[in-house]
Amino acid sequence: MSSAPRPVVLSGIQPSGRLTLGNYLGAIKNWVPLSATHDCHYMLVDLHAITVRQDPAVLRDRCLEFISLYIACGLDPSRNVLFVQSHVAAHARLSWILNCYTQMGELGRMTQFKDKSSKHVDNINAGLFDYPVLMAADILLYNATGVPVGDDQKQHLELTRDIAIRFNRAHGTPEHPVFTVPEPMIPPVGARIMGLQEPTAKMSKSGGAETDALYLLDPPDTITRKIKRAVTDPGNEVRFDVLEKPGVSNLMAILSATTGESFDRIVERFDGQGYGKLKGAVAEAVVECLRPVQARYAELRADEDGLMRVLREGAQRASRVADTTLMRVHQALGFIPE
Ligand code: ATP
Ligand code: LTN
């Protein structure tokens, strides 16, 4: 009996620092349940990571750390295609083609480009500018219908959709589009976790102060200490108000995303109790949420041969889909078949 094709999702994270609670709550946590209903592809985007200088030995180690963490967070390699972007040549190949369908002005408007180029003034390279085109290639190669990401990636997703629609108009027909136009899948809570020291900027795995981010592999006492020292706001009332109370609102978002408790319930529970009690509860919730992940991580990271097997198999499965799309694009462009 043939069953209808399942919708496809694809997402990725740059191995450009240590994974944070923001990466987990905004992205990975939401990837896990999707394998029940979707064909899931999750990458380590190492080609994207080198838009900022990386130390080669650290990058290699980090990729193995990330893949272990993906699995430890619940991404079973038999139910999800887990792979490294640079292992699938079609990403770089499609990216070149899509460059010719993207305008300089579109890329210049990307807020991530503006942020990163102001942080890395001595290395504003063409790859940093072109980053969203490679991301569009990542997504379009797999015919992804949905892309589960945090809120900060919405603008890149909109550009991907524009590029796909433009290419389809030029080279497809309404009945036979070349590319599937993807939709963003952004979680309602935890979509943007902010820094603990700077709650008006997102918690980031690279570049921020050590105490600004909670890392997935931080020991429990470090997590507790960082949360206890998180910046809060004047007054002592626990209430969700991103403008007036960015620090407290961020702690509430972390608590809600880790325990499932609603904002109303949190306000009720901490009414008249002050920030100290809230911080204690947040610390406990984060430690409990990460405990099983950290335990499983240690076992997985110790088996490097096993991790390499997962990556090889993932690359083979991913290449089959990606190469088929690339050949369809070549045909649409009039390139002589290989
Ligand atoms: P970098 O600091 O190197 O730019 P990053 O921590 O912003 O990295 P990315 O690799 O750019 O992480 O993003 C990976 C995924 O994690 C994306 O889906 C992104 O939306 C999500 N994400 C990153 N930071 C946060 C955050 N603070 N809150 C929620 N989601 C986040
Ligand atoms: N740009 C993304 C990482 C990324 C990605 C992708 C996310 C690269 N390729 C494809 C989803 C789909 C970021 O989070 N900074």
Image (tube, rainbow, N blue to C red):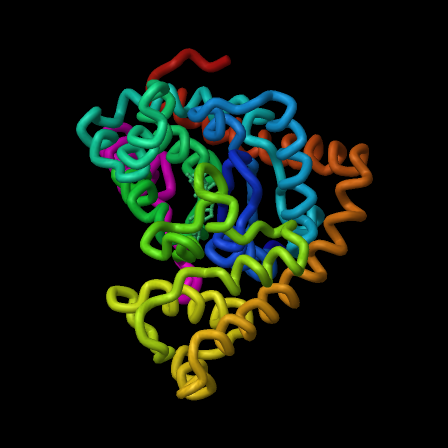
Is 249 left, or right, of 102 in this rendering?
A: right
Visible residue check, residue 335: yes
The residue shown at (40%, 20%) is 330
Residue 59, position in %: x, y?
60, 28
Asked whether 121 or 10 is in front, the reply is 121
The x, y position of residue 159, in whole percent, is 28, 39
Position in image of residue 79 (x %, y %):
66, 51
The segment highlighted magenta reads 163-191
Pick the residue in front: 214 or 150: 214
User: Is 195 located above or below residue 243 in the figure?
Assistant: above
**Can residue 172 be seen here?**
no
Q: x and y percent of residue 78 in the render?
A: 71, 48
Q: Residue at x 38, y 50 (%)?
A: 202
Q: Nearer the viewer, residue 84 or 176?
A: 84
Say which quarter of the image contains residue 272: bottom left
Q: With 86 as the anchor, is 141 left or right in this view?
A: left
Q: Where is 10 relative to 259, above or below?
A: above
Q: Residue at x 29, y 44 (%)?
A: 155
Seen from the viewer's position, the closer of residues 125 and 77 is: 125
Q: Quadrant of the N terminus?
A: bottom right
Quarter-wise, where is residue 101 in the image? top left
